[in-house]
């Protein structure tokens, strides 16, 4: 009897094809699973307040992960976003007393965009590997921030009220940062699916020669991409300083590697050409819930990090296996 | 034929997946004999060479050396049994110096230097890094290294291709002397003049089959060409009917494309021709005669090292494929994988050029895109059942996508590099009429094809390139396969291919 075996095969194949065509489904299932486990571990934790908090902390991560998703689609990465966000946060907090809130916000985004432009020139025109280029500009940014700190040491710092409202406030229970995040996320998702720029990101990541053959000058795309990544990182810094309310020289730096992890867990291929921003958002939520879970377990910091690392590896490995080509 | 063959291969079969590269190949080489191995592109020459040298293993068949059954599993083993190849590409490691390369291959230094001298290279320093040496010297060093190991059978693959004339003379002399020592040579070359002056016999392969062995002598060239072509296998009339007649062209107008004295790198030396609007111009050449470089220059991928390209009478310079596309020059490369986004949909692949310019990076009008893409899909009859990902399409349909892209985006000059290679006969028959149709609507098509019968089916004229130069321009009605084959081998006007470059067409006024 071979029929049942064949049937099994076709069901397994169908499931695979379904997962492959809907890569978001297993991620959402995983997210729900984690929440259920958390509720079992600590009954009653799952309430409106907790959801709001989780989203509040997931948003800056998801925004930095947007930078990773976009650059990874072209086969790149942006390791300077942690410091770019920190610089914006620090500049806004130290300049608000001098320039007023709107001026400080505008000025604070300039260095982040400039880091992005430098990355774009290095990667797009001089063909420096993105890993090296963004690591380099990140270090340079760190140095510049330290120099800048000395010049404003007497100024003191304060977080503009509008940013505090955005970062920590809630309206009818929903975090105010959604006001920034939802339009941004919608814009990115739309741009990736329905704009020429989005198409070109996928094209360059999958086959840069083919893009060139079709007349695409990829340096233009890369330059715009990294500048955009810098801008998003800067905005993230503003939201994040409103959430943490204590600007420091390494404010958003700890978010850098989780932002890479969120993109990868969300199904973005680091080799380029494959990934969605909706996956990345779920990835950021998964990481945030995971962090809560490990905190709830009251593990010592060391074992918590070990667990965190292991879970990321296992989830990514399994996810890649079930959604890749059979 | 000699009594006891030094090397004997018989019934050799090799398939790669579904493709049968060798069906039944055989050849014999006697001691002291020089045998040419001949065959058109894709006849199975290189597969047979790789099997003889142990680089790949045959599925079936026997290889004997000195009557002893002989199985080699690696090039090193083949070397030990006395069969030493010199390949077309230099095989020394570029980052090491000459001495280190010799140590690596355990080549004795004294005889090596003696051969280098004999082959006409003086003043070679052993501590010279290989990457600083010119290509011709590298070829000579490869040969000297092979000779230093005193091979019983020397296998030379296009040995003289990159050499200047004086070195060619030296090489031929040295090779000839091998057989005085009772050693044998298998000689692969596209140059008939060398074969007739050097070889005793020629073994001819066609479609993976050894079709015969000819004693080389006066008049044998014609026989060899005939054997390489074989009897006409396909009924061509049917296709001709489908493609319609080539249209008459006015001769007085400014040509769409005029190429003058174009050169690029070492492969493309001096190419001049004109292509008119509404014309399908064929390019015929053996492998590696400079056609790849010609297309890359015309498509804006490479900058020429000399010469001019004129479009509609105006001089143009392409710095990027985007420049060529802006001038209406669009390129369908030989390898589909170079042109396609395999994981993306048919629609995205076809629409890709629409969004190349920053002005078009914004919102996509999905309705308008669909109309344009569907128009191209209809026109090329692309099977869209698996349109979600191009990699799920058949080869023929993938090829159609690469062409459809330019039909949707707009084309004035289509540069098509071997568009029908490796695709099914039905798709081929759809592609020829399509090219003719494009021409009839006023576009120009430059078509390189490795299948000679396509020239009469699809082209108005054919430019024949040999050794980086145009050796002949033939009207379609005269471009039957034997004529093209002779021309491709540099045998135009019975001049036996000697100094093929000299009878290149003069640039037209």
Image (cartoon, coloured by chain):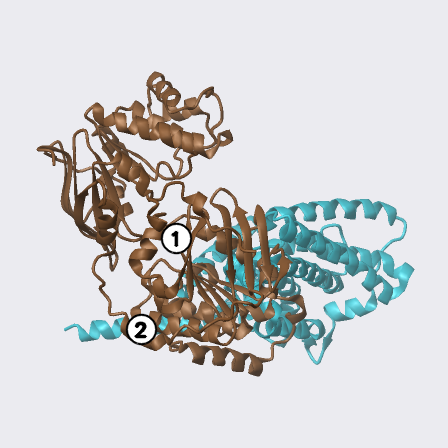
Chain colours: A cyan, B brown
Q: Is residue A57 left or right of residue A318?
A: right
Labels 1 and 2 in the same subunit: yes
User: For the residues marked 1 and 2, what is the alpha-carbon distance in whole angstroms?
Assistant: 23 Å
What chain does mark 1 sit on?
A: B
Give coordinates of residue B371: x percent, y percent.
53, 82
Whether residues under marks 1 and 2 lie with C-beta atoms below 8 angstroms apart, the answer is no
> Which labelled disc corresponds to residue B508?
none
Q: Which residue sits at x=29%, y=46%?
A: B46
Q: Residues within 10 Å of mark 1 (few under 14, many from 20)?
A: many
Q: Which residue is mark 2?
A: B239
In front here: B19 or B448?
B448
Determine if residue B83 is in view.
yes
Q: Chain of mark 2?
A: B
Q: Quadrant of residue B176?
A: top left
Q: Nearer the viewer, residue A263 or B5?
A: B5
Q: Is residue A22 above or below residue A82?
A: below
Q: Is residue A75 visible?
A: no
Q: Residues within 10 Å of mark 2 (few under 14, many from 20)?
A: some
Earlier in the chain: of badge 1 and badge 2, it is 2
Residue for badge 1: B285
Query: At 58% across and 46% down in the image, what residue appears?
Result: B306
User: Residue A21, how many percent across, how many down?
Assistant: 43, 72
Question: Picture coordinates of residue B142 (x, y %)?
Answer: 37, 30
């Amino acid at each position: 009897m071979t029929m049942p075996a064949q049937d099994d095969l076709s069901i397994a194949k169908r499931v695979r094809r379904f997962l492959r065509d809907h890569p978001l489904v297993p991620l959402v299932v995983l997210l729900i699973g984690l929440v259920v486990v958390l509720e079992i571990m600590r009954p009653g934790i799952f309430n409106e307040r907790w959801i709001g908090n989780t989203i509040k902390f997931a948003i800056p991560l998801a925004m930095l992960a947007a930078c990773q998703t976009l650059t990874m689609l072209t086969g790149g990465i942006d390791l300077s976003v942690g410091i770019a966000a920190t610089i914006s946060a620090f500049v806004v907090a130290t300049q608000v007393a001098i320039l007023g809130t709107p001026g400080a916000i505008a000025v604070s985004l300039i260095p982040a965009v400039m880091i992005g432009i430098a990355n774009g020139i290095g990667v797009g025109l001089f063909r420096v590997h993105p890993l090296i280029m963004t690591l380099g500009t990140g270090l340079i940014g760190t140095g510049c921030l330290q120099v800048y700190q000395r010049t404003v040491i007497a100024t003191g710092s304060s977080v503009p009220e509008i940013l505090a409202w955005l970062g920590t406030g809630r309206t009818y229970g929903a975090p105010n940062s959604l006001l920034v995040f939802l339009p941004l996320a919608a814009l990115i998702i739309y741009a990736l699916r329905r704009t020429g720029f989005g198409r070109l990101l996928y094209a360059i990541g999958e086959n840069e020669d083919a893009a060139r053959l079709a007349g695409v000058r990829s340096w233009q795309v890369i330059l715009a991409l990294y500048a955009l990544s810098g801008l998003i990182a800067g905005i993230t810094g503003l939201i994040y300083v409103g959430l943490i309310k204590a600007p420091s020289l390494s404010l958003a730096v700890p978010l850098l590697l989780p932002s890479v992890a969120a993109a990868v867990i969300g199904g973005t291929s680091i080799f380029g050409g494959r990934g969605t921003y909706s996956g990345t958002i779920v990835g950021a939520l998964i990481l945030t819930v995971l962090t809560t879970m490990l905190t709830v377990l009251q593990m010592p910091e060391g074992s918590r990090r070990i667990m965190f690392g292991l879970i990321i590896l296992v989830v990514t490995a399994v996810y890649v296996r079930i959604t890749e080509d059979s | 034929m000699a009594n006891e063959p030094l090397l004997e291969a018989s019934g050799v079969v090799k398939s790669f997946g579904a493709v049968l590269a060798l069906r039944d190949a055989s050849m014999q080489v006697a001691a002291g004999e020089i045998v040419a191995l001949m065959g058109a592109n894709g006849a199975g020459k290189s597969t047979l060479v790789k099997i003889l040298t142990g680089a790949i293993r045959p599925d079936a068949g026997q290889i004997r050396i000195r009557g002893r059954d002989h199985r080699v599993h690696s090039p090193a083993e083949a070397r030990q049994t006395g069969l030493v190849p010199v390949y077309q590409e230099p095989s020394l490691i570029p980052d090491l110096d000459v001495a280190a390369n010799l140590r690596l291959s355990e080549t004795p230094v004294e005889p090596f230097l003696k051969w280098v001298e004999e082959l006409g290279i003086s003043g070679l320093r052993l501590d010279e890094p290989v990457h600083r040496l010119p290509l011709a010297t590298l070829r000579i060093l490869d040969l000297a290294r092979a000779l230093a190991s005193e091979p019983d059978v020397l296998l030379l693959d296009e040995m003289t291709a990159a050499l200047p004339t004086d070195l060619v003379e030296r090489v031929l002399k040295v090779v000839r002397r091998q057989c005085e020592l009772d050693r044998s040579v298998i000689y692969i070359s596209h140059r008939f003049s060398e074969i007739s002056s050097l070889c005793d016999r020629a073994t001819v392969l066609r479609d993976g089959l050894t079709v015969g062995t000819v004693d080389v002598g006066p008049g044998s060239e014609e026989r060899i060409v005939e054997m390489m072509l074989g009897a006409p296998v396909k009924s061509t009339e049917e296709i001709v009917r489908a493609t319609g007649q080539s249209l008459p062209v006015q001769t007085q107008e400014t040509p769409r494309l005029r190429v003058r004295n174009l050169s690029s790198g070492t492969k493309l030396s001096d190419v001049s021709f004109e292509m008119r609007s509404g014309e399908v111009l064929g390019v015929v050449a053996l492998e590696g005669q400079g056609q790849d470089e010609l297309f890359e220059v015309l498509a804006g991928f490479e900058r020429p090292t000399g010469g001019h390209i004129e479009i509609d009478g105006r001089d143009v310079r392409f710095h990027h494929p985007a420049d060529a596309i802006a001038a209406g020059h669009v390129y369908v490369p030989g390898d589909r994988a170079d042109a396609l986004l395999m994981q993306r949909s048919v629609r995205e692949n076809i629409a890709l050029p629409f969004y190349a310019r920053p002005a078009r990076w914004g919102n996509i009008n999905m309705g308008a895109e669909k109309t344009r893409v569907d128009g191209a899909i209809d026109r090329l009859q692309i099977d869209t059942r698996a349109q979600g990902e191009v990699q799920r399409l058949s080869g023929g349909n993938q090829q159609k996508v690469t062409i459809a892209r330019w039909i949707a985006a707009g084309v004035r000059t289509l540069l098509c590099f071997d568009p029908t290679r490796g695709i099914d006969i039905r798709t081929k028959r759809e592609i020829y009429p399509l090219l003719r149709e494009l021409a009839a609507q006023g576009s120009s098509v430059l078509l390189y094809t490795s299948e000679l019968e396509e020239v009469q089916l699809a082209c108005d004229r054919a430019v024949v390139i040999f050794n980086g130069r145009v050796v002949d321009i033939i009207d379609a009605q005269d471009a039957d396969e034997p004529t093209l084959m002779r021309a491709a081998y540099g045998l135009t006007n019975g001049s036996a291919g000697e100094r093929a470059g000299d009878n290149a067409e003069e640039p037209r006024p």
